Image (tube, coloured by chain):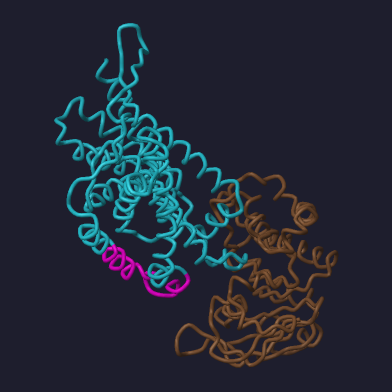
Amino acid sequence: MEGFLQALAAGLLIGAVYGLMCVGLGLIFGVMRVINFAHGDFMMLGMYAAFYLFTAAGIQSLFGNTVGPFVAILLAGPVLAVFGYFVHLALISRVSGTRTASLEGEGHYAQLILTLGIALILQNGGLIVFGSVLASIRTPLSSSAWELNPFLDIGIFLNKARSIDAIVSLAIMILLSLLITRTRIGKSLRAAADNPTAATYMGIDVDRAHRTAFALGCGITAIAGGLLATNYPFHPFVGLEYVIVMYAGVVLGGMGSIIGAFWGGMTIGLVQQMSTLILPTQLQNAAIFAVFLLIIFFRPQGFFGRMVERT
Amino acid sequence: MLRIEGLSAGYSAKPVLNDVSINVGAGQFVAIVGPNGAGKTTLFKTISGIVKPSGGAITFDGVDLLAVPPPQRAHLGIAHVPEGRQVFPSLTVMENLEMGAMTESGRRDWKANIERIFEWLPVLKERRDQFAGTMSGGQQQMLAIGRGLASSPKLLMLDEPSMGLAPSTADFIFERLIDIRRQSGLTMLLVEQRVAEALESADHGYVLEAGHVVLEGNNDTLRADDRVRKAYLGM
C-alpha cells in the first residue's frame, strides 16, 4: 500500500512535467501537422539555456540556489521561443504551410528530412559547444522532501524540486489552455489547424499562425526540459531519450488534440513510475510501450482524438 | 465593385479558366451558373488567392487584387463562403462566427452583426455552444453564411450553398439569402448548379462552360435563351 501510494505520487509529479513536454510538441503537430524530429533537441537546448542562465548570467547570485533555478528555467522558455520563431522563419516555413499546401503529401517528406537534419546539427553542435560532460541544474530542493501522511501509519515522501516542477507545469498548462480557448490568437490557431484554406478566407495568415505555434511549442518544451533537469542530469544527446516519449504522449492523447497531449504525457509518467512496483527499473520504458500499444489497440484515435477530421 | 478581366487560371499547364471576364457592380446580385467542372470554384479560389492565375486582372474597389496577399483579401471586404461549407469542426458555432469577424470592420460591427445574423439564422443562436462539426449539413451551411456575414463584407461570395442538401433545406437557405439581400443591400456573387433558382433571384447572370463565359445577361435574357432553357431549365 505504501509503495503503491509512493509510486502514484511520483508518477503524478513526473507525469505533469512529461505532460507539459508533450504539449509543446502536440501544439506544433496539432496546428501545423509537421512531424518535428528535432523537438527533443530543442528541449536539450532549453535545458542548457536554463543551465547557463542560472550559472553564467547572474541569476544564481541574484536569486540564490533555491529560487534561482526556477527563474532561469522560466526564462529559458522565451529564449527558445525566439529561437523557434527564427528556425520556422528561416527553415520550416519553406517546407510547410501555404508554400507546400498544393504539393503531393503537403511536403511531409521534405519536413522529415529537414527536422532530422536540424536534430543532427543541434546534437553534434551541442557536443562541440557544451561538451560531453553531464550537466545538471541542482537545487537544495532536489535532495529534500516533504512527508505526507494521508493515513496514520503511512507516510509518502514528495521530493520538493519535483513537486515544484509539477506545480509550475500545471500553472503553465492552465495558462496555455486559457490562451487557446479564450483569446483571439488561440482561436485563430485552432481555426488554422482545422482548415487552413478556410482560415485564409477569414483573413488569418496561416503561416504566421504556424510560426506562433512553433515558437510557443519550443518555449513550452524548453521549460519542461529545464524542470526535468532539476532531477535528471543531461547531455547534448538527451533529446533522443525524450523525443520518443513525447511522440508516444502526443499519439496517446490523440493526434491534433493539444490538451490531449498533456494527458498522454501524464499517462506515460504514471505508467513509468507504477511499473517499478512490479518490474525491474530497466524495464520502465518497455512498460510504457506495452501500455501504449494496449491503449492504441483499443482506442486508435487516442484519448481526445478528433472523430471529425478536417476536410 | 469587382472586375475580372481576361482571367486564366488552373492547377497544371492546362488552364481551368480561359479568358474569363466578369463584372459585379456595387449592390448587385450576380449569379454564375454552369455544369460541374466548368471552373466555378476555381474562379472563387482565384479571387481569394488560393489559386494563382496565369493571366488577366482582378480589381476590387479599385485595388489590384492580385497584388494583395491572400489572407489580406478578407480584410478588404471579401467574404468567401466556400464550397462544401468548410466550417471549423472543432470550434463552437460562436467561435466560428468570431473567426468570421477577424477583419477590422467585423470587429467594429460585431454586436450589431451578431444580432442580425441570429435574427436571420436563428438556429445558430440555439446552437451557439455546439461544436460545428457535430451539426447537420444544412446547419453548417447556415453557419458558413453567418461566418461570412460576420466580417461585415462589401462582397459576399457564395459557392454552391445548396450543395449536398435536401431540396427543402436548399430552398430554405435560398429564401434566407434573398431576405438577407433585400434587408442589407449587400453585393453578392453566387455560384450555383440550381440554375432556375439562381437566375430567378439574380440581377445579372453568367453561364460558365469548360472555363469560358458562353453567355451573359440579365435574368430575362438568360431565361429566354434557347440554350439555357434546354440545357439548364429543362424546358
Q: What residue is rendered at 66% in x and 74% in y?
A: B192
Instruction: Tell how many labels.
Output: 0
User: Is residue A232 shown left or right of residue B133?
Assistant: left
Quadrant housing residue B235 = bottom right
Depth check: B100 or A6 in front? A6
Q: Residue A307: percent from the left, percent from the top? A: 46, 49
Q: Residue A224: percent from the left, percent from the top? A: 37, 43
Asked if B189 appears above or below B8 in the picture, the reply is: above
Which chain does cyan denote in the image? A
- The residue at the far front in this view is A61
Quadrant housing residue A6 = top left
Q: Quadrant of the N terminus of chain A?
A: top left
Q: What residue is rendered at 58% in x and 83% in y?
A: B38
| A110 is within the stretch colored magenta | yes
User: Is residue B182 shown left or right of residue B38?
Assistant: right
Q: Residue A148: percent from the left, percent from the top? A: 36, 16
Depth check: A65 or A225 in front? A65
Dominant secondary-structure state across the stretch colored magenta? helix
> Color used for chain B?
brown
